[in-house]
Image: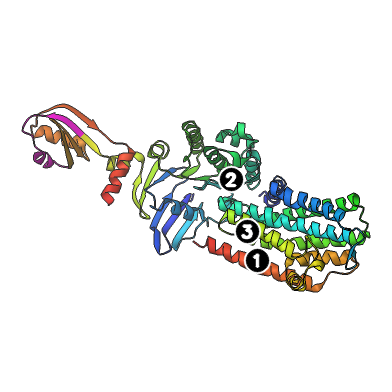
Amino acid sequence: MKHTSIPATIAQCKAEILRTARNKRFVFFSILLPVGFFFLFTSTMDSSMTIGNADWGAYYLMSMTAYGVIGASLTSFAQRIAKERAEGWVKLVRLTPLPSWSYVFSKMAAQGVINLFIIVVMFLIGGIGRSISLPLSVWLLSGLWLWAGGFSFMALGTLLGSLRNQDLTQVLSLIVYMGLSILGGLWMPTATFPDFMKTVAAYTPTFRLGEGAWNLVGGGAISLTGVLILAAYVTVFMVLSSYILKKQEAV
Amino acid sequence: MTAAIQLEQVTKVYKGKTAVDRLSLTIERGSVVALLGPNGAGKTTTVSLMLGLQQPTSGQARLLGSDPRDRGVRDRIGAMLQEVSVIDNLTVEETIGLFRSYYRRPLPLDRLLRMAGLEESRRKFASSLSGGQKRRLGFALAAAGDPDVLFLDEPTVGMDVEARRLFWASIREMAGQGRTIVLTTHYLEEADQTADRVIVMRQGSILADGTPESIKAAAARRTLAFTAAPGLTSERLLTYPGVTDVEWKGHRVRIACRDTDRLLFALLKGNERMKDIEITAGGLEDAFETLLREAN
């Protein structure tokens, strides 16, 4: 018996990546906007400024890379899920021999490739376009952190994508994306926030994803609290979205 | 050889409503079966139960001798569901290619494109297709795995005349190769021309089951019309066997009756004077309506 799981999973990954690359919202929110913001705010601000121990350029590159990675999960990934559900695509795929693990795995693998692409593009732009110099180990570690941490936003993307209404998903994911990015200090560093806002920021997943990379470029290490808070969010979002999906399927 | 589909005393209740009520049904391999019935008769639920998309509240559904959710079974079936599903940002051929990758022995891409009449739109984004074209893409996806059993839930809704003709030609070709086809449709003419077995459903159970001809014969509104001599009354006509309805237009009378042959002999025997005798038999549509009316 010929096995189809592997080629089917590869085809499924390829389709997910194609769909993302052709999605204008993805190109805008995850590539153009972070690149544009990065150039804008590293040229208008004093380049010798430091935040913590990190140089402003390196700090903001990490912020914008995190912003791009998060956008890929919250706007385009959530939107893809919502579209598939609204048009009965999921139901149709359930009737095929494609195993459900392969369906889920392809989505994660594709998102891994997409996030890696965003990180590489942003790091190349920062390293070459703005001559940010960091030790190789810091480039690798911060890249790896953003890549691994980026998966946690797939859980929130799934939750947003599991809402019944496609338009609601679109509007809500944009609000959540922008809101969390600003609150978490990805647009403007939390160092510029009033104290109360700093406390709020410390609880956002966006801040925690950025924090790991900011610490690394500042010569520090990833904080365990940050990892735990991200993990807690993943758990909550996954429980919520599987509850919603179960409820919708229970007929 | 096991039957293609077996439903044993299947009941499906949801939200306190019985959609399918103790339905037992066996569909042999190689048959083309049409499920007919008014909206809410339980056709789509029945198909969902056969496919394992829904689980019966009680009873058992078997597809190709196994649980419909078995991966081995999934490899040998294809379905066009009522919802028109396309995926965003993929072209027609990419979408079909994706589905082909799921199956062990897929049909060639070019053959699927030809069957669906989508050769010229192969590089278009699936989401930009017209409603009828999306439906045809759905057919190509259903046929992608070269299925032994093909399910078609209201397949031709939204297709134009030409697309419909091509579609049924493809279906008949597939049926000719010994595949089992289960379809639901509102277009009775299509069921009449394509199916070798028609199952009429109402309120979740089977009202009639047989060849299109036997259903028509059993329920069709056959009528006998003639120009009557003066003095013939409706009361007298209603005393003849099997007469259900009498309608006058001047001297011309039209009598509805199950067995028009028997009625004609009886009228001749009764020495009724008749001119310009005409017998008409209704199509499946009439039969369908008669069945539903009688059931109510």
> Viewed as shown, does residue A205 lie left or right of A129?
left
Q: Residue at label 2?
A: B86
Q: Looking at the rendered structure, which numbered label has been put on residue A172?
A: 3
**Mark 3 belongs to chain:** A
Residue placed at 78% from the left, 53% from the top?
A34
**Residue B268 seen in the figure:** yes
> What amino acid type should be assigned to the residue bearing mark 2?
Val
Mark 1–mark 2 CB contact (< 8 Å) = no
> What amino acid type should be assigned to the residue bearing mark 1?
Met
Does B228 lie within the magenta span?
yes
Q: Looking at the rendered structure, which numbered label has been put on residue A53?
A: none
**Between disc 3 and disc 1, whose residue precedes?**
3
Cα–Cα span, label 2 and label 3: 24 Å
In front: mark 3 or mark 1? 3
Residue closest to the eye, B73 or B277? B277
**Mark 2 belongs to chain:** B
> Viewed as shown, does residue A155 lie left or right of B172?
right
Residue closest to the eye, B21 or B131? B131
Q: Dot 1 lies on which element?
A: helix
* Range covered by the magenta-colored residues: B224-242
Q: Residue at label 1?
A: A238
